[in-house]
Amino acid sequence: MKTIEEKADLYIKFGWWRTVNGWINRVKEGYIQGYKEATRWRDPKEELPEIGKPIIVKYRTAKDVEKYGIAKYFDLGIGNPWTIEGSTGRNVIGWRPIE
């Protein structure tokens, strides 16, 4: 598996901007920042996902085991707003969009 820096180098190597002086480092940095934003875990206490859209979640089970799954967020005002693979009894500790 390639590191983000190696992926950015490939992105730059095959892009149209490879002939424009001074832009290569900016493009590489922009690629890396975009990648990090897309793959960062969001704290559900600070930021919530779009209602009803599938997302990836990091959660804790009743036995305090950390797991990952596909979920949707529904803020209905009753019960747990997270539906994780058909279950609602889990504690979501992080989420990120499916890109």
Image (cartoon, grey):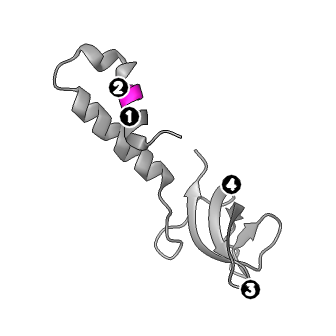
What's the amino acid at mark 1?
Answer: Ala
- The answer for how far apart the CA atoms under marks 3 and 4 are is 25 Å
Q: Nearer the viewer, residue 83 or 38?
A: 38
**Which residue carries the number 4 mark?**
54
Q: Pinpoint residue 58: horizontal percent, then vertical percent.
A: 62, 67
Pick out the residue farthest to the right. Answer: 86
Quarter assignment of residue 22: top left
**Which residue carries the number 2 mark?**
12
Q: Quadrant of the N terminus?
A: top right
Mark 4 or mark 1, which has the lower sequence index? 1
Q: What span is colored magenta in the figure?
A: 8-12
Callout 3–callout 4 Cβ contact below 8 Å: no
- The answer for how far apart the CA atoms under marks 3 and 2 are is 46 Å
Q: Is residue 65 left or right of residue 10?
A: right
- The answer for how far apart the CA atoms under marks 4 and 2 are is 31 Å
- The secondary structure type at the circle numbered 4 is loop
What's the amino acid at mark 3?
Answer: Lys
The mark closer to the camera, 4 or 2, is 2
- The secondary structure type at the circle numbered 2 is helix
**Which residue carries the number 3 mark?**
63
- The secondary structure type at the circle numbered 3 is loop
- Above or below 79: residue 85: above
- The secondary structure type at the circle numbered 1 is helix
Callout 2–callout 1 Cβ contact below 8 Å: yes
